[in-house]
Image (cartoon, rainbow, N blue to C red):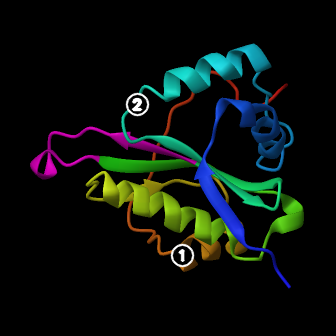
C-alpha cells in the first residue's frame, strides 16, 4: 500500500533535507552552502505568492518544486507562474507524487490569479516529457536561455 503524500510550503528548517533532495535532480550540480541557502530562502520568501513546495511520505521529504509568481503588465495585469526545480527522490518515482506536487503548484498559481503556469525542462528523455504532458503541461512554446556561470562543477 502506498502512503499518502503530504504537501506543504518549505520551511527554513527543511533546507538541509531539501538540499539533499536536489542531488536527485542533478548529482553533479553545485550544492548551495548552508549559510547561503538560508539567505536565498529568506530572500525568496519576499516574493508574494511564490513558494517552494515540498512533499512528504511520512517524515521523508520525497518531492519538491519551486513556484515563482511573476507580476505582469499584459493579460489585464494578471501574473503568471513559473515552476522550476521539479524533483522526486529516485526511490519514490512513478508513484504519482510528482504529478500531485505539480497539481498543488498549479492550484497555488490559480489562487494567485495567474493566467498561466509554465515550466521548462532540459531533459529530452521521453519518459520525462511524457510525465510533464500527463501532468497537464503542453509543449506549445519554444524556450531559449542564456547562462552566465556553469551550473555544474567542472
Of the pair 8 and 132, the residue shown nearer to us: 8
Residue 54: give x, y in percent of width and height.
Answer: 66, 51
Q: Which numbered circle lies on residue 26?
A: none
Residue under label 2, please give it: 47
Residue 71 part of the magenta-drawn span: yes
Q: Residue furthest left?
A: 76
Circle 2 Cα neighbour tier, 10 Å, few/some/many (<14 / 14–19 / ≥20): few
Q: In the figure, residue 59 lies in which quadrant?
A: bottom right
Q: Which numbered circle lies on residue 133?
A: 1
Question: Which element is circle 2 on?
Answer: loop
Residue 112: give x, y in percent of width and height.
Answer: 31, 51
Q: Residue furthest bottom?
A: 1
Asked if residue 119 can be seen in this view, the reply is yes
Q: In the figure, residue 40 lies in which quadrant?
A: top right
In space, the residues marked 2 and 1 are separated at their CA atoms by 28 Å
Q: Is residue 90 above or below residue 37?
A: below
The C terminus appears in which quarter of the rendering? top right
Q: Is residue 18 above or below residue 116?
A: above
Mark 2 or mark 1, earlier in chain: 2
What span is in magenta?
A: 66-79
Amino acid at each position: 500500500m502506498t502512503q499518502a503524500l503530504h504537501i506543504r510550503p518549505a520551511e527554513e528548517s527543511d533546507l538541509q533535507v531539501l538540499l539533499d533532495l536536489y542531488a536527485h535532480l542533478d548529482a553533479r550540480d553545485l550544492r548551495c552552502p548552508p549559510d547561503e541557502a538560508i539567505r536565498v530562502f529568506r530572500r525568496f520568501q519576499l516574493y508574494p505568492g511564490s513558494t517552494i513546495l515540498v512533499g512528504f511520505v511520512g517524515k521523508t521529504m520525497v518531492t519538491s518544486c519551486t513556484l515563482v509568481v511573476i507580476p505582469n503588465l499584459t493579460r489585464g495585469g494578471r501574473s503568471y507562474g513559473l515552476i522550476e526545480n521539479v524533483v522526486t527522490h529516485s526511490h519514490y518515482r512513478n508513484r504519482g507524487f510528482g504529478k500531485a506536487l505539480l497539481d498543488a503548484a498549479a492550484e497555488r498559481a490559480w489562487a494567485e490569479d495567474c493566467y498561466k503556469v509554465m515550466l521548462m525542462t532540459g531533459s529530452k528523455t521521453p519518459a520525462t516529457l511524457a510525465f510533464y504532458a500527463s501532468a497537464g503541461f503542453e509543449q506549445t512554446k519554444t524556450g531559449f536561455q542564456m547562462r552566465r556561470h556553469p551550473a555544474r562543477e567542472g
